[in-house]
Image: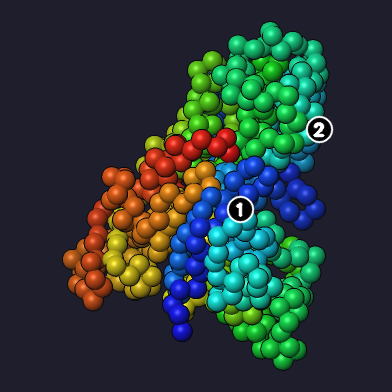
């Protein structure tokens, strides 16, 4: 099977006369943690929406999980996971109800749902919290549960949109350990973040400026190429050149 | 007289104790940072100090005025930028600024010198409705509106959350300029790396203050040897480093993992225990605010 799980070529999205995403091309390999960085307004969200099958490109081509982003958006949705910090779980449903809800969304059978729910509860040591309202859980637990439900259908790729915003330093790190583990087990991770130390945790990082991918490499190669000591410096050097007013 | 004085303040919402016996003092002209994650109680403290909430227990004074009795006096002399965008989206940039000036009975011209360094950056878009501005421009407009009545004290609730690293840095440059003009600033942020831009900071978590001091003095309280370690396989290193004698904690820290150690730790032993890992490196490092925060949280 092909080792490239996301591949885009000259992907472009225009809104009227505004080119939000401007001919971007890249490949992501299985099991990579791919950091997708950029200044506010650089076009990250627009690009990510196209990769998730939520929006069609104006031109260019690409595939995600083996499906064409132009014609097979619905199939892509079934084969990826998605999690954002802002919305992932229903606070007024219990842990179990949230799991069952997301299992239902992804069309899992009753027996599959039962088996996966059991596995999630055990892995997260949540068995005693089965009937707790998610709203009453500490933030760190909610995040782990969000990640677990986003991957309940065993997708090969997970998109994480600023998953760690506003989270305390310990929880943030526990979350990244979950990401490491998932990647280790072969899941491809596509993640956006404003924390530059998290960029260092990625296998490769792309940086978007004004709709274009203007750098893409491993963190250590990027630092070398920009003669920088940290990813923060690399990011600043590139984003300072941005013309678009956010 | 301190600009802000908080004495044993507590505030609960139902069963949730948002603030648990918090005390702090901010001097005039200080740039004071509240550093902590969601749920630390930062917003509740701002809402108490701007007289939008009453405390359950404790007292506080802002610019010498009691937050319960003298709330009207406080509202005249403080500027407040809430965490959520709170301007009128269907008014233009200019209309919003005029509106806030009118609320406080001042003219935009009279305060123009103060807001100009910030407002000038969005003035080319003054005809645009505030709801149509980008995130960074909204933030600049909100700061301009919070400054229009020349407040003595400025409260900024997470002005840089969700903002990219470059824009965050620019925002802190603006705050430094305001501080130069003598305005006392209390600002909250979940980004630990911004702490260094403050004169003093309070590290807060779950309604309590873990530590208050200048950024450099806070890290002096870190009393265990700290090392940065690196190897080709960082995930494996993370798991295996935790099993080595003398390692109390190991956590990812950017390019490296940090290991906190006790007296039984020895770098030679560490290297020989993990010699199966390729490209293993270890070096002693100075703790950062984030290391200190982690240590205080785990206590």
Task: Give the vertical position of A209 relative to B52 (above or below).
Answer: below
For residue A151, which numbered disc appears in the image?
none
Q: How many marks?
A: 2
Vertically, is B88 above or below A130? above
Query: Residue at 68% across / 63% down in the picture?
Result: A54
Res A217 quadrant in image: bottom left
Per the image, label 2 sits on a secondary structure element best described as: loop
Q: Quadrant of residue B54?
A: top right
Residue at screen point 40% across, 56% down: A216
Depth order, front residue of B275/B62 = B275
Q: Which chain does the residue under circle 1 lie in?
A: A
Task: Find the residue positioned furthest to the top.
Answer: B110
Residue at x-position 31% and y-position 56%: A221
Q: Residue A200's image quarter? A: bottom left
Whether residue A55 is visible here, answered yes or no, is: yes
> Is residue A31 rendered to the left or right of residue B85?
left
- Observer-nearest of B146 and B224: B146
Residue A156 image position (x, y, % from top left): 54, 77
Reading the image, the residue beneath label 1 is A13
Front-lying residue, B221 or A41: A41
- Which quadrant of the figure contains the C terminus of chain A? top right
The numbered dot on residue B90 is 2
The residue positioned farthest toward the bottom in the image shown: A111
- Residue A178 in sight here: no
In the shown orientation, is residue B83 left or right of residue B252?
A: right
Q: Position of residue A53 (x, y in %)?
A: 65, 66
On the image, the x and y values in percent for residue B101 come to 76, 17
Real-space Cα separation, disc 2 to disc 1, in angstroms: 28 Å
Tag 2 subunit = B
Q: Does residue B299 appear left or right of residue B204 in this picture?
A: left
For label 1, the SS is: strand
Label 2 vs label 1, nearer the camera: 1
């Amino acid at each position: 099977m092909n080792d490239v799980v996301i591949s885009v070529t000259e992907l472009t999205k225009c809104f009227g006369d505004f080119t939000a995403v401007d001919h971007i091309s890249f490949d992501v390999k299985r099991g990579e943690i791919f950091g997708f960085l950029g200044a506010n307004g650089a076009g990250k969200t627009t690009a990510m929406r196209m990769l998730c099958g939520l929006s069609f490109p104006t031109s260019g081509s690409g595939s995600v999980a083996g499906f064409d982003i132009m014609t097979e958006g619905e199939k892509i949705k079934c084969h990826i996971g998605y999690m954002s910090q802002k919305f992932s779980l229903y606070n007024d449903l219990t842990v179990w109800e949230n799991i069952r809800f997301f299992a239902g969304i992804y069309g899992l059978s009753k027996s599959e749902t039962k088996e996966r729910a059991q596995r999630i509860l055990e892995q997260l040591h949540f068995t005693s919290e089965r009937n707790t309202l998610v709203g009453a859980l500490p933030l760190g637990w909610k995040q782990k549960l969000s990640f677990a439900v986003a991957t309940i259908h065993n997708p090969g790729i997970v998109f994480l949109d600023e998953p760690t915003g506003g989270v305390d330093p310990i929880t943030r790190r526990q979350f990244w350990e979950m990401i490491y583990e998932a990647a280790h087990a072969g899941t491809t991770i596509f993640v956006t973040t404003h924390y530059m130390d998290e960029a260092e945790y990625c296998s490769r990082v792309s940086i978007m400026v004004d709709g274009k991918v203007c750098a893409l490499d491993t963190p250590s190669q990027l630092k070398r190429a920009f003669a920088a000591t940290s990813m923060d410096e690399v990011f600043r050097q590139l984003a300072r050149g941005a013309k678009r007013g956010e | 007289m301190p600009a802000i004085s908080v004495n044993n303040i507590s505030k609960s919402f139902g069963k949730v104790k948002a603030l648990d016996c918090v005390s702090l003092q901010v001097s005039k002209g200080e740039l004071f940072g509240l550093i902590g994650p969601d749920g630390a109680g930062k917003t509740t403290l701002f809402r108490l100090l701007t007289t939008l909430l009453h405390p359950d227990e404790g007292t506080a004074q802002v610019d010498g005025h009691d937050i319960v009795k003298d709330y009207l006096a406080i509202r005249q002399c403080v500027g407040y930028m809430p965490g959520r965008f709170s301007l009128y989206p269907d008014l233009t940039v200019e209309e919003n600024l005029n509106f806030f000036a009118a609320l406080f009975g001042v003219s935009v011209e009279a305060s123009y010198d103060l807001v100009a360094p910030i407002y000038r950056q969005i003035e080319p878009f003054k005809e645009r409705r505030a709801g149509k501005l980008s995130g960074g421009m909204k933030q600049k407009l909100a700061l301009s509106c919070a400054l229009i009545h020349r407040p003595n004290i400025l409260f900024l609730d997470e002005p840089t959350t969700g903002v990219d690293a470059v824009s965050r840095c620019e925002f802190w440059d603006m705050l430094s300029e305001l501080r130069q003009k003598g305005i006392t600033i209390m600002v909250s942020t979940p980004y630990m790396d911004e702490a260094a831009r403050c004169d003093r900071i309070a590290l807060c978590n779950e309604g309590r203050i873990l530590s208050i001091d200048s950024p450099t003095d806070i890290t002096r309280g870190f009393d265990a040897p700290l090392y940065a370690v690196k190897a080709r396989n960082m995930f494996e290193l993370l798991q295996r480093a935790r099993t080595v004698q003398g390692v109390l904690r190991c956590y990812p820290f950017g390019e490296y993992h940090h290991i906190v150690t006790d007296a039984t730790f020895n770098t030679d032993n560490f290297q020989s225990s993990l010699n199966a890992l390729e490209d293993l490196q270890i070096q002693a490092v100075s703790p950062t605010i984030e290391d200190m925060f982690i240590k205080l949280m785990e206590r």
